[in-house]
């Protein structure tokens, strides 16, 4: 599989371009999760290649699924590169938080003409980080949005639970499994 990797410092975005081996002038920007080179991304790429598309898999940063004022301009920068390399039609897809990310990007970047937001919220959430903090694997970051545009945080819906209650609520709802699909009350309450 022919691919080209990009990093934020050198290219202005973090991602991997997977060129369709059969050729194409259409590309799907895939916001597949934690990293554009992990198994989920590669499975998405394989499926999209079978549909005749090139793929630019992107994520906020290397092995970092935190979303704190993530600049939507990074997608715009990726599109500029994609245009220079023969792509003329642009779609975007993401799931969950990345689905919200794809909907916001499509609303602000006119080049995007096809959008998939799978299990996406139709509003922007408060920023959050993943890692380790006070025994928590994820926490809200006060006074931040998940996304920004032109250097300004987008208006956002704050979580009703803040640190450390945010993670405690997730643990309570998921019975410690970490299965975020079960943490509906966290989102419903907010």
Image (cartoon, rainbow, N blue to C red):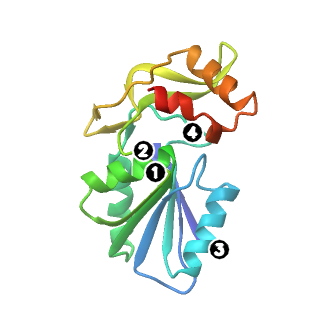
* Quadrant placement of the N terminus: bottom right
Give the residue at mark 1.
Answer: 99
Give the residue at mark 3.
Answer: 1
Earlier-in-chain disc, 3 versus 2:
3
Q: Secondary structure at mark 1?
A: helix
- Describe residue 173's horizontal placement relative to residue 147 as left or right: right
Residue located 70% across and 16% down the image: 135
Could you classify mark 1 by the number of other residues whose Cα lies within 10 Å: few (under 14), some (14-19), or many (20 or more)? many
Q: Nearer the viewer, residue 36 or 121?
A: 121
Q: Nearer the viewer, residue 37 or 177?
A: 177
Q: Which circle, 2 or 4, is nearer the viewer?
A: 2
In the displayed structure, would residue 46 be above or below residue 156? below
Earlier-in-chain disc, 1 versus 2:
1
- Describe residue 171's horizontal placement relative to residue 35 as left or right: right
Give the residue at mark 4.
Answer: 65
- Describe residue 121's horizontal placement relative to residue 41 as left or right: left
**Residue 36 placement (x, y as % from top left):** 58, 55
Q: Mark yes or no: residue 100 visible.
A: yes
Q: Which circle, 3 or 2, is nearer the viewer?
A: 2
Q: Which circle, 4 or 1, is nearer the viewer?
A: 1
Q: Mark yes or no: residue 13 visible.
A: no
Q: Quadrant of residue 129?
A: top right
């Amino acid at each position: 599989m022919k691919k080209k990797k990009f990093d934020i410092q050198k290219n202005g975005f973090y991602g991997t371009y997977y060129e369709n081996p059969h050729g194409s002038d259409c590309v799907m920007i895939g916001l597949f999760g934690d990293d554009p080179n992990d198994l989920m991304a590669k499975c998405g790429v394989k499926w999209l290649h079978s549909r005749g598309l090139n793929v630019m898999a992107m994520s906020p940063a290397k092995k970092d699924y935190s979303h704190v004022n993530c600049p939507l301009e990074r997608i715009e920068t990726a599109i500029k590169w994609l245009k220079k390399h023969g792509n003329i039609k642009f779609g975007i897809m993401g799931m969950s938080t990345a689905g919200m990310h794809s909907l916001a990007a499509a609303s602000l970047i006119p080049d995007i003409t096809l959008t998939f937001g799978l299990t996406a919220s139709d509003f922007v959430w408060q920023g959050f980080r993943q890692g380790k903090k006070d025994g928590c694997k994820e926490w809200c970051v006060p006074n931040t949005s998940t996304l920004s545009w032109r250097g300004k945080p987008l208006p956002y819906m704050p979580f009703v639970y803040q640190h450390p209650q945010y993670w405690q609520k997730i643990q309570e709802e998921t019975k410690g499994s970490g299965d975020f699909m079960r943490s509906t009350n966290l989102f419903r309450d907010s």
